[in-house]
Image: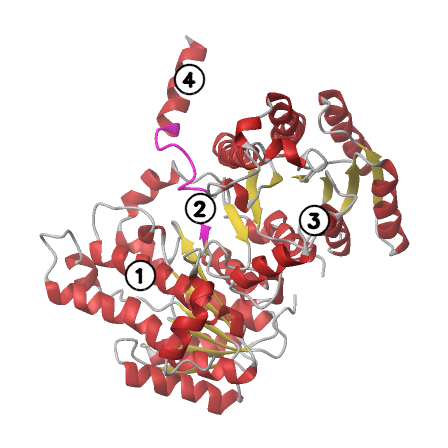
C-alpha cells in the first residue's frame, strides 16, 4: 500500500510500542520517516529496520523535554527529506519508575506533574511550533498527537498523566482551529489499553485479564492498531477529518463501564442472543 | 487499495451522494456491493456505472419486511455478508420541510422520519447480524450526523433519529463486539452533495466559516472513512462515532468573529 507515498514524517517516541509500529507502517506506506526517541539506539534500530526493508529512514536521539532538540529535530527532518508533511507527537512520559509518585493524590508531587506535562504536552506543542511555519509555507501539513482514554474520565491514579492528556486534547482542537483553513490538519489518537512493552511492564496478569473483560472486542489492542489509525489520519483519505479525537479502544468508552461485567446476568435473558 | 478484497457489502441509500460514493469506494477496495435504495432505477444506474460484480436492489427502509428481503437477497446473490453500511435517510422534500420544531412538527412526520432513519437501521442490523455471526463476524457502519450530537434550529426529528443511530451503534458494539461484530458510526458535517446544494444554498457560506479545512466536504471523504472502518485497519475500533466534518464541532463557536476582531486590532 502506498497511502503515504512521497510524504515525509517525523515520529517522536518511535523507538518502541505505538511509535515504533507507526514508523514501520508509515514506511511501508511509502513515507520517509525520521524515527526519534530519547534512547538513541532504539531510534537507530527502528530506522535500520526500515532501511533493511527498502524504506527511507533516519534515526535521531531527541529528548522532547528540550525545546532546542525539537527545533533541531524539525530542521534535520526537513534537510534529510526536503520537506515535512507529517509530525506525529507520540513521545510520552508515563512516570514509570516514579509510579508511586503519581498514584496517591495526597502525595501529589508538583515536580512529577511538571516533568510529565513538559514531555506529554509541551513536547508536542513546541514541536508543532517549529513544524507549522514550514507547513504553512507549503500550504499543507498534518499533525498527530497521541492522547489517551485517560484524558476522558476520572481516575484513581495517574493524576498528572491523565491531566496531561486532557491538555493534549485541547491543543489538538486549537491547532486545528487556528491553522486548519490554511491547510494544517491536526488530530488526536486516543488509544485504549494497548499491549505495549510499557503496559506489560506495569500491569500484572490479573490486571490485564480485567482489562480484557471490559472490552467490546475479543482481544486487547496492539500497537499496529494505532499505527493503522495514524496512517489513515495522516493520509489524504482523512482530508475532511480535523480537530478530531479518534478513539481506538476496543469500544471500552462506548459502553456503560460495567456493561460487559453483566454478561452472566443479562445474556441468559436474551433468548435470541446467539452468544 | 484492496483492503476489502472478496468482502460482500450492502450500502443502503446507495443511489444518493454519500451512498454511491461509498459503494464505488468499497468496490474499488475489492468488495462486491449491493447498492440498495428506494429508487431502484437510480440504484441500477449507480451499480451499472460502478460495474464489476456490484449490483442493485430496490427496497423500502420504512418497511421491515422489505429490509429483511433485501438482506436475504444480498446473501443469496453473493453467498455471505461482511459489511453493512446503513446510510438511507428520508429525504422527501415534503417531509424535510415539515420536520421543524417540537411545536411545529406534525407527529406523523416524526414517525415517518424515525421509521426510515432509525428503525430502518435497527431492522437492517437485526437481520444482518445473525448472518455475520454465522460467519464469525462483520462490520456495520451507520451514517449518523453532526445533528445527532448537537442541537439545530430545525429538523428536530432528523437530529433525534441520528442521535438514536449513535446510541444503537454503541449498544450493538457492546452487545455483539465480543462475538466479532464491529459497529461504528460516521457523523458527517457539511458535505456538498446535490441534495445539500439544492436544499439551502445560502447556509453553505455560513457553515463554511466553521469548517476548519481549506475546502468543504465531499461524499468521497465520507466514503474514505467508511472504507477505513470497514477494513481490518479498524479492528480495534468499536462503538465509535467518527466525525467527518472538517473540524466544524471542535472549535469555540466564536472563533471566526474573534479572528476578524484580532485582525482589526492588529491593523489599527
Q: Does any portion of residue A221 appear in the rendered image?
A: no
- The secondary structure type at the circle numbered 4 is helix
Residue A17: assigned label: none
Determine the residue positioned at 62% across, 23% down. A114
Nearer the observer: mark 4 or 1; the answer is: 1
Determine the residue positioned at 57% across, 59% down. A210
Stretch in magenta: B242-255
Q: Is residue B254 magenta?
A: yes
Give the quarter of the figure containing the N terminus of chain A.
Answer: bottom right
Q: Which residue is mark 1?
A: B164
Rendering coords of residue A171 (x, y %): 53, 32
Q: Do the CB atoms of the residues marked 2 and 1 lie less than 8 Å apart? A: no
Q: Nearer the viewer, residue B230 or A168?
A: A168
Up-down relation of residue B94 to residue A229 (above or below): below
Q: Residues within 10 Å of mark 3 (few under 14, many from 20)?
A: many
Up-down relation of residue A72 to residue B199 (above or below): above
CA–CA distance in space, label 4 to label 1 = 40 Å
Determine the residue positioned at 87% across, 56% down. A53
Residue B262: assigned label: 4
Q: Which residue is mark 3?
A: A18
Q: Main secondary structure of the magenta part?
A: loop
Nearer the observer: mark 3 or 4; the answer is: 3
Determine the residue positioned at 26% across, 76% down. B62
CA–CA distance in space, label 2 to label 1 = 26 Å
From the viewer's perspective, is B164 left or right of A186?
Answer: left
Q: Please determine if labels 4 and 1 lie on a single subunit.
A: yes
Amino acid at each position: 500500500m502506498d497511502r503515504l507515498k512521497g510524504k515525509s514524517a517525523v515520529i517522536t517516541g518511535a523507538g518502541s510500542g505505538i511509535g515504533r509500529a507507526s514508523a514501520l507502517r508509515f514506511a511501508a506506506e511509502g513515507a520517509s520517516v525520521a524515527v526519534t526517541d530519547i534512547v538513541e539506539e532504539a531510534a537507530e534500530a527502528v530506522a535500520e529496520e526500515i532501511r533493511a526493508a527498502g524504506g527511507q529512514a533516519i534515526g535521531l536521539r531527541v529528548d522532547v523535554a528540550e525545546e532546542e532538540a525539537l527545533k533541531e529535530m524539525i530542521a534535520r527532518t526537513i534537510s534529510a527529506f526536503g520537506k515535512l508533511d507529517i509530525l506525529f507527537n507520540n513521545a510520552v512520559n508515563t512516570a514509570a519508575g516514579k509510579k508511586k509518585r503519581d498514584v496517591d493524590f495526597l502525595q501529589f508531587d508538583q515536580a512529577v506533574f511538571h516533568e510529565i506535562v513538559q514531555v506529554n504536552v509541551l513536547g508536542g506543542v513546541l514541536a508543532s511550533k517549529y513544524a507549522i511555519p514550514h507547513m504553512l509555507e507549503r500550504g499543507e501539513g498534518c499533525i498527530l498527537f497521541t492522547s489517551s482514554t485517560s484524558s476522558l474520565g476520572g481516575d484513581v491514579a495517574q493524576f498528572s498523566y491523565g491531566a496531561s492528556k486532557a491538555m493534549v486534547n485541547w491543543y489538538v482542537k486549537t491547532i486545528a482551529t487556528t491553522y486548519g483553513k490554511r491547510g494544517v490538519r491536526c488530530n488526536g489518537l486516543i488509544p485504549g489499553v494497548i499491549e505495549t512493552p510499557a503496559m506489560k511492564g506495569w500491569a500484572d496478569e490479573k490486571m490485564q485479564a480485567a482489562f480484557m473483560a471490559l472490552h467490546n472486542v475479543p482481544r486487547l489492542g496492539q500497537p499496529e492498531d494505532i499505527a493503522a489509525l495514524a496512517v489513515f489520519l495522516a493520509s489524504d483519505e482523512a482530508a475532511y477529518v480535523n480537530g478530531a479525537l479518534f478513539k481506538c479502544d476496543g469500544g471500552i468508552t462506548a459502553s456503560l463501564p460495567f456493561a460487559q461485567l453483566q454478561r452472566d446476568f443479562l445474556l441468559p435473558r436474551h433468548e435470541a442472543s446467539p452468544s | 487499495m484492496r483492503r476489502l478484497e472478496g468482502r460482500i457489502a450492502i450500502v443502503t441509500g446507495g443511489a444518493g451522494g454519500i451512498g454511491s460514493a461509498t459503494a464505488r469506494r468499497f468496490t474499488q477496495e475489492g468488495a462486491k456491493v449491493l447498492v440498495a435504495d428506494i429508487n431502484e432505477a437510480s440504484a441500477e444506474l449507480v451499480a451499472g456505472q460502478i460495474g464489476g460484480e456490484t449490483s442493485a436492489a430496490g427496497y423500502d427502509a420504512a418497511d421491515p419486511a422489505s429490509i429483511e428481503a433485501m438482506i436475504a437477497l444480498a446473501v443469496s446473490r453473493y453467498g455471505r455478508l461482511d459489511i453493512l453500511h446503513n446510510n438511507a435517510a428520508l429525504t422527501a422534500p415534503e417531509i424535510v420541510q415539515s420536520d421543524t420544531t417540537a411545536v411545529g412538527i406534525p407527529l406523523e412526520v416524526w414517525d415517518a422520519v424515525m421509521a426510515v432513519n432509525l428503525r430502518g437501521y435497527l431492522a437492517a442490523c437485526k437481520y444482518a447480524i445473525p448472518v455475520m455471526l454465522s460467519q464469525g463476524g462483520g462490520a456495520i457502519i451507520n451514517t449518523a450526523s453532526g445533528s445527532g450530537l448537537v442541537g439545530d434550529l430545525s429538523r428536530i426529528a432528523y437530529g433525534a433519529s441520528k442521535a438514536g443511530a449513535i446510541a444503537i451503534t454503541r449498544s450493538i458494539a457492546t452487545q455483539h463486539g465480543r462475538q466479532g461484530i464491529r459497529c461504528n458510526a460516521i457523523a458527517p458535517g457539511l458535505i456538498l452533495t446535490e441534495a445539500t446544494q439544492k436544499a439551502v444554498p445560502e447556509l453553505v457560506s455560513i457553515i463554511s466559516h466553521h469548517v476548519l479545512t481549506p475546502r468543504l466536504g465531499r461524499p468521497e471523504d465520507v466514503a474514505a472513512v467508511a472504507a477505513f472502518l470497514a477494513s481490518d485497519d479498524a479492528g480495534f475500533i468499536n462503538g465509535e462515532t467518527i466525525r467527518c466534518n472538517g473540524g466544524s464541532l471542535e472549535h469555540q463557536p466564536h472563533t471566526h468573529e474573534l479572528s476578524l476582531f484580532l485582525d482589526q486590532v492588529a491593523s489599527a
